Image: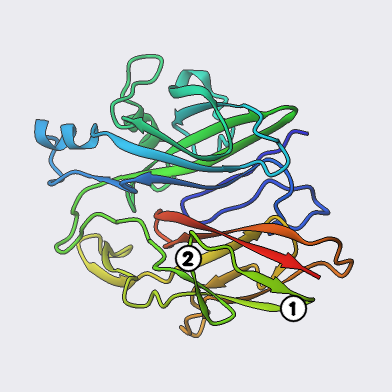
Amino acid sequence: MKCWGLVLALGAVACVDPKDKPDLVHDFRVLGLSTERPELYAPICELTDEAIDSLRSEVTFRALMVDPNGQGRPIQYTLWACADADDTTCSDTANRVKLAEGSTNEGELSLAIHPGDTTAEDGTPLLVRVKEKDPYQGLGGVRMPLVLHAKAGNEEVYAQKLMVFWCPLVEGMKPNVNPTLPGLRLEGESWSASGVPEIRGKGPFVLQAEDVSALQEEYIVPGLREYQQAVHLKESWIIAWYATFGEFSPQVTGGTDFGGQAGRHRTEWEPPEELGEARDVVFWAVVRDGRGGQSWVSRRLHWSP
């Protein structure tokens, strides 16, 4: 099986068969990509040595790779920095840089990388190439694609994360931080990472995130019409829900509708109509802030008919 799953700065798209459901995780997938920090931020917008060095700083790249039926098989991976966000497999060899490669197992892959300290094949800084290929020429930050290529047996995934490089173009701008879920609830009760609660029956069962309203950051970006004008915004987090058994309704929660109404982080999980045997079920909640930040949590429960 070969598939291309994209985890973009503004969202996550699971790698699935067209007839499959994205929230049912039964094969090898990359459910999330994150960098700590989500933005590399120069203290000033002038090309001084200090500003350039700050963009070369180390960041931690993380990938949530799940392989529920792989029985611990090895996963081979290569991580590239690329110039063109439309090149989702990083195929342009003249404008890509290998950041890491190796072998791991399912779970969270964590790598220390320096994406800002990279050069294209001809010696040009890769950040320059990224800006050249950006139709917006860096408006909204220079967004460098990081592409993870992972193989597990005959299954293959490409996943992309946009690493943001920016500076304070207007007063009040500051670097983004990754969103972090304060906790989850199952049927109204706190659901800890160490506990394995037991549930029974057809459901549906209510899953919720603890209140995140106070954690959603207010932030400032330059205006589109007047570049030196400050535009004040606030994050509206979105959570994608996944499990190794059953399905969610809805699969994605949160966000804001066209009327400005924020959605609740509440979903219902239920087993399939053909219930089958009792089993342990693994759940993931992948949260993104709409501006490049992303993280995730995992929980387990024991379900029986």
- Label 1 vs 2, first from the N-terminus: 2
State left or right for residue 199 relative to residue 11.
right
The residue depicted at 43 percent of the width and 46 percent of the height is: 34
Q: Position of residue 60 (x, y in %)?
A: 35, 38
Indicate the quadrant where residue 302 lies. Answer: bottom right
Q: Residue beneath label 1, please?
A: 203
- Quadrant housing the C terminus: bottom right
The residue depicted at 66 percent of the width and 73 percent of the height is: 250
Q: Is residue 76 above or below residue 15?
A: above
Indicate the quadrant where residue 156 lies. Answer: top right
Secondary structure of the residue carrying numbered label 2: loop
Q: Is residue 231 above or below residue 148?
A: below
Q: Residue beneath label 2, please?
A: 192
In the rendered structure, find residue 60 and report the number of the disc placed on it: none
State left or right for residue 143 relative to residue 72.
left
Q: Residues within 10 Å of mark 2 (few under 14, many from 20)?
A: some
Taking depth in this image into account, of 195 and 48 the one nearest to the observer is 195
- Quadrant housing the N terminus: top right
Q: Type of residue at label 2?
A: Ser
Q: Position of residue 14 (x, y in %)?
A: 65, 50
Which mark is in front, 1 or 2?
Answer: 2
Q: Residues within 10 Å of mark 1 (few under 14, many from 20)?
A: few
Kindly give the residue lying farthest to the right in the view shown: 274
Q: Is residue 260 above or below residue 81?
A: below
Taking depth in this image into account, of 134 and 176 the one nearest to the observer is 176
Q: Position of residue 82 (x, y in %)?
A: 46, 30
> Cα distance, mark 1 to mark 2?
20 Å
Kindly give the residue lying farthest to the top in the view shown: 122
The residue depicted at 52 percent of the width and 63 percent of the height is: 195
The residue depicted at 89 percent of the width and 66 percent of the height is: 274
